[in-house]
Image (tube, rainbow, N blue to C red):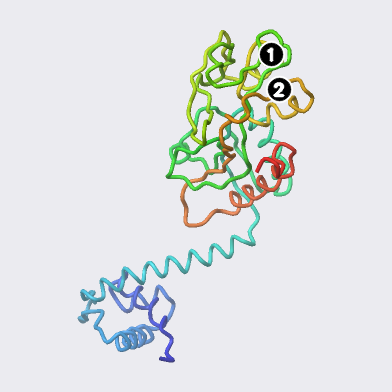
């Protein structure tokens, strides 16, 4: 068939939604005769009547009602495709609202977002740093940076970087209290507790949570690190806190066969049919920029 199979679709939808050929013609800016001709040709190709016609109004047949639903989806998809192509060439602009954990945001994300904004002067950013996972839809947020394992399946996730947890202690602490050689020995050590007293470990390929105890607790990763460096106890912290100190010998990595599998740093955003330029380009920028940092070298991936 050499005929244009799309011909008449827009005219058909306009008539169905307006209920009149003349109103449909006004909407599309064409003549009523053009509308009538296109609809008639469409019915002929389909070998199906789409409308019941009267002198004052047209109504859909059963076949027309079914066809209308599909045609409206086709129109939506066409417009979505055109917007998506247009967005590829669009610069980020307008307001972008995002959230991230406090320490990670201050150290990694906020400086990168600031550099990104310098590239796009029409962009405005509102960043909420919070260790409480905010509901993106309820809080009207465009983007969240989350660490570790994801819980909310309603969100779309893009992996930005690896994340590895280390269990470690200072040489001064290990000299006084000894080095643990098994998970069971953790019960004899003073464990520095952050936001949770459950440490993630693995044994024989099985990941599990180990409850620890100690005389020191604070829901700040930096504070846990400072206490560990001072020799107060053992800690379990992400790579970006401890790698520098492991290299200098200020901290010693412990129970390495039992360290949990790598998790990740994620960009999360509400499910949408396509991403806006400001979100998509910022996510790409963050991923590329984090990959250049020593904390996320290929050795960790």
Q: Quadrant of the C terminus?
A: top right
- Rendered residue at 50%/28% (across/down): 132
- Helix, strand or loop at disc 1? helix
Say which residue label 2 marks. Answer: 252
Say if mark 1 contacts mark 2, CB within 8 Å: yes
In this rendering, is residue 66 above or below 47? above
> Where is 122 relative to 296, above or below?
below
Residue 116 position (above or below residue 65) = above
Asked if 7 appears above or below 214 in the picture, the reply is below
- Percent x, y of residue 244: 75, 28
Q: Residues under labels 1 and 2: Cα distance? A: 9 Å
Q: Position of residue 211 (x, y in %)?
A: 48, 19
Nearest the viewer among 151 and 273 is 151
Left or right: 285 with respect to 53? right
Label located before the other in sequence (1 or 2): 1
Reading the image, the residue beneath label 1 is: 174
Determine the secondary structure under disc 2. Answer: strand
Quadrant for the N terminus, please: bottom left
Along the viewing direction, whichever of 181 and 143 lies nearer the viewer: 181
């Amino acid at each position: 068939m050499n005929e244009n199979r799309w011909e008449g679709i827009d005219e058909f939808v306009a008539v169905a939604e307006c209920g009149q050929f003349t109103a449909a013609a006004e909407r599309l800016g064409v003549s009523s005769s053009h509308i009538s001709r296109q609809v008639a040709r469409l019915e002929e190709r389909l070998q199906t009547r789409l409308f019941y016609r009267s002198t004052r109004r047209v109504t859909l047949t059963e076949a027309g009602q079914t066809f209308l639903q599909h045609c409206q989806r086709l129109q939506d998809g066409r417009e979505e495709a055109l917007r998506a192509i247009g967005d590829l060439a669009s610069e980020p602009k307008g307001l972008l609202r995002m959230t991230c954990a406090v320490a990670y945001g201050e150290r990694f994300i906020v400086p990168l977002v600031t550099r990104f904004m310098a590239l796009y002067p029409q962009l405005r950013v509102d960043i909420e740093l919070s260790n409480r996972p905010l509901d993106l839809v309820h809080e009207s947020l465009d983007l969240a940076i989350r660490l570790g394992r994801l819980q909310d399946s309603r969100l779309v996730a893009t992996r930005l970087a690896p994340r590895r947890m280390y269990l470690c202690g200072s040489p001064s602490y290990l000299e006084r209290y000894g080095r643990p050689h098994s998970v069971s020995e953790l019960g004899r050590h003073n464990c520095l507790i952050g936001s949770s007293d459950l440490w993630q470990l693995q044994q024989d390929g099985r990941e599990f949570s180990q409850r620890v105890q100690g005389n020191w607790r604070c829901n700040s990763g930096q504070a846990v690190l400072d206490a560990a460096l001072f020799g107060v106890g053992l800690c379990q912290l992400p790579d970006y806190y401890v790698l520098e100190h492991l290299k200098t010998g200020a901290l010693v990595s412990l129970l390495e066969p039992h360290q949990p599998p790598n998790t990740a740093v994620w960009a999360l955003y509400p499910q949408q049919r396509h991403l806006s330029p400001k979100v998509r380009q910022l996510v790409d920028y963050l991923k590329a920029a984090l990959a250049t940092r020593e904390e996320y070298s290929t050795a960790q991936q």
